[in-house]
């Protein structure tokens, strides 16, 4: 079972975590201070989170990622919002790659270089 820092259950199994049935939402995904993170329609947009994951939660090969402005990292949408209502566009763990790996590129893509940790019981 995976829970947030505030004890909210987000998934009862790894399979559920990487399915459409998880409880990852804008309201349950919080920052390190327990505060809401800006979503796609808010300024500044911080809804992209670093995951490096395919939709099933497995990692991409290491060669996929590079650092700096020429690199790229796989991102998910913490608020599960995207430009269209397609499974990839609203995925929390595998929505699209970044335009670079430096802070300015991550902000340009729609994020702040945030990543998330889950506690399992």
Image: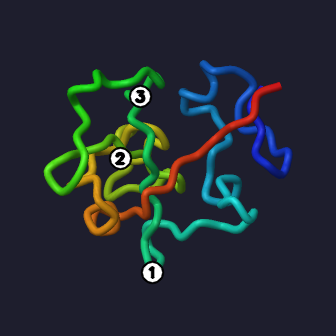
- The residues bearing labels 1 and 3 have C-alpha atoms spaced at a distance of 27 Å
In this view, the residue farthest toward the bottom is 43
Residue depicted at 35% across the width and 39% down the height: 88
The percent coordinates of residue 46 (x first, y second) are 46, 66
Query: Label 2 vs label 1: CA separation?
Result: 20 Å
| Visual colour scheme | rainbow
Image quadrant assignment for residue 100: bottom left
Residue that appears at 39% across and 37% down: 94
Name which residue lies at 50% across and 67% down: 39
Q: Are marks 3 and 2 in contact (CB under 8 Å)?
A: no
Residue on which disc 1 sits: 43
Q: Which tag, 1 or 3, sits closer to the chain's start?
A: 1
Q: Earlier in the sequence, mark 2 or mark 1?
A: 1
SS of the residue under disc 3? loop
| Residue 27 rendering spot, x and y as whole percentages | 68, 59
The x, y position of residue 38, in whole percent, is: 54, 70
Question: Residue 41: where, in percent of width, then height?
Answer: 44, 73
Q: Secondary structure at mark 1?
A: loop
The residue to which callout 3 is attached is: 55
How packed mark 1 is, by other alpha carbons closer than 10 Å (few <14, some 14-19, many 20 or more), is few
Q: Residues within 10 Å of mark 3 (few under 14, many from 20)?
A: some
Residue under label 2: 89
Q: 32 or 37, which lies in front?
A: 32
Rendered-image quadrant of the N terminus: top right
Q: What's the distance in space between the residues labelled 3 and 2, CA to CA?
A: 11 Å
Dot 2, how many residues are within 10 Å of its Cα: few (below 14), some (14-19), or many (20+)?
Answer: some
């Amino acid at each position: 079972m995976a829970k947030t820092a505030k004890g909210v259950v987000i998934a009862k199994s790894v399979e559920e975590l990487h399915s459409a049935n998880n409880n990852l939402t804008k309201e349950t995904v919080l920052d390190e201070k327990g505060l809401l993170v800006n979503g796609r329609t808010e300024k500044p947009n911080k809804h992209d989170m670093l995951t490096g994951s395919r939709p099933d939660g497995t990692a991409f090969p290491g060669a996929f990622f590079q650092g700096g402005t020429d690199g790229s990292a796989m991102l998910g949408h913490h608020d599960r919002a995207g430009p269209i209502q397609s499974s990839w566009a609203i995925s929390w763990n595998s929505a699209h790659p970044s335009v670079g790996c430096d802070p300015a590129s991550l902000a340009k893509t729609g994020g702040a270089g945030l990543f998330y940790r889950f506690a399992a019981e």
